[in-house]
Image: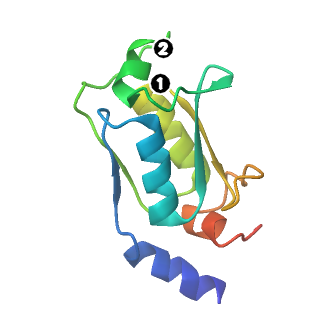
Amino acid sequence: MGLLNNIKDHFTNAEFAVAPNKKVKTVCADFKKTFGATLAIYKGAQLADPEMTLAALNKRTTKDVKTKGADELKIKASMKVGDVEKLFDKTFGLTVQIKDPKGEYCVDNKLTIGQAARGESK
C-alpha cells in the first residue's frame, strides 16, 4: 500500500503555497487542513508569535535571506520533510518542524509529507 500512497501523494493536494503576507496561525492551520500533518514555526528557539506574518518574522531574523518580499513557497505532499524544512529556512529564514498529525513528535526528515500525515515511520 506504501507505493500506492506515494503515487497518490504526487496528485493529491498538488501544491500548497505559503505567501509571506500570511499569519503564522493561518499557515499552520492551512498546512494541517491540506496535508493532515502539523507544522510548527519557530523564531529562534521559541514558537513564533501566531499573530505575526511570515514577512514580519523574516525581517526580524539575523539570517541573510535571499528572497523578495512577495516570494511564495510551494509545497507538495510528495516532498521530503527535511527538504520542506530547508525551504522555509532558505525562503523566510525561519525554523520549522513538521510533526505527526497530533503534533506530539517531529517526524523523520526522510519521510514525505504524505507519509508523515499517514503516521508512517519509514
Residue type at mark 2: give it.
Answer: Thr
Instruction: Name the side, left or right, on which 30 lies relative to 110.
Output: left
Name the mark on residue 93.
Answer: 1
**How many C-alpha atoms fall within 10 Å of the one at disc 1: few (<14), some, or many (≥20)?**
many
Residue at left 58%, top 63%?
A: 112
Residue at left 73%, top 54%?
A: 108
Residue at left 34%, top 25%?
A: 55
Looking at this view, name the residue that lies furthest to the front. 51
- Which percent across, then down, holds residue 87? 46, 39
Instruction: Name the side, left or right, on which 43 lies relative to 77.
Output: right
Q: Quadrant of the C terminus?
A: bottom right
Q: Mark 2 = which residue? A: 61
Residue 60, image quadrant: top left
Instruction: Name the side, left or right, on which 75 lies relative to 67.
Output: right
Q: Quadrant of the N terminus?
A: bottom right
Q: Nearer the viewer, residue 1 or 22?
A: 22
Q: How far, Cα to Cα, is label 1 from label 2?
A: 6 Å
Q: Nearer the viewer, residue 98 or 50?
A: 50
Residue 59, image quadrant: top left
**How many C-alpha atoms fall within 10 Å of the one at disc 2: few (<14), some, or many (≥20)?**
some
Residue type at mark 1: give it.
Answer: Gly
The answer to whether 72 is drawn above or below residue 74 in the figure is above
- Which percent across, then down, holds residue 68? 24, 24
Tell me if label 1 and label 2 are in contact, CB under 8 Å: yes
The answer to whether 70 is drawn above or below residue 17 in the figure is above
Query: What is the secondary structure assignment of the residue under circle 1?
Result: loop
Q: Nearer the viewer, residue 75 or 57?
A: 57
Residue 84 in view: yes
Instruction: Name the side, left or right, on which 106 lies relative to 77.
Output: right
Among the two numbered marks 1 and 2 on one chain, the one whose residue lies closer to the N terminus: 2
- Which percent across, then down, holds residue 6? 55, 77
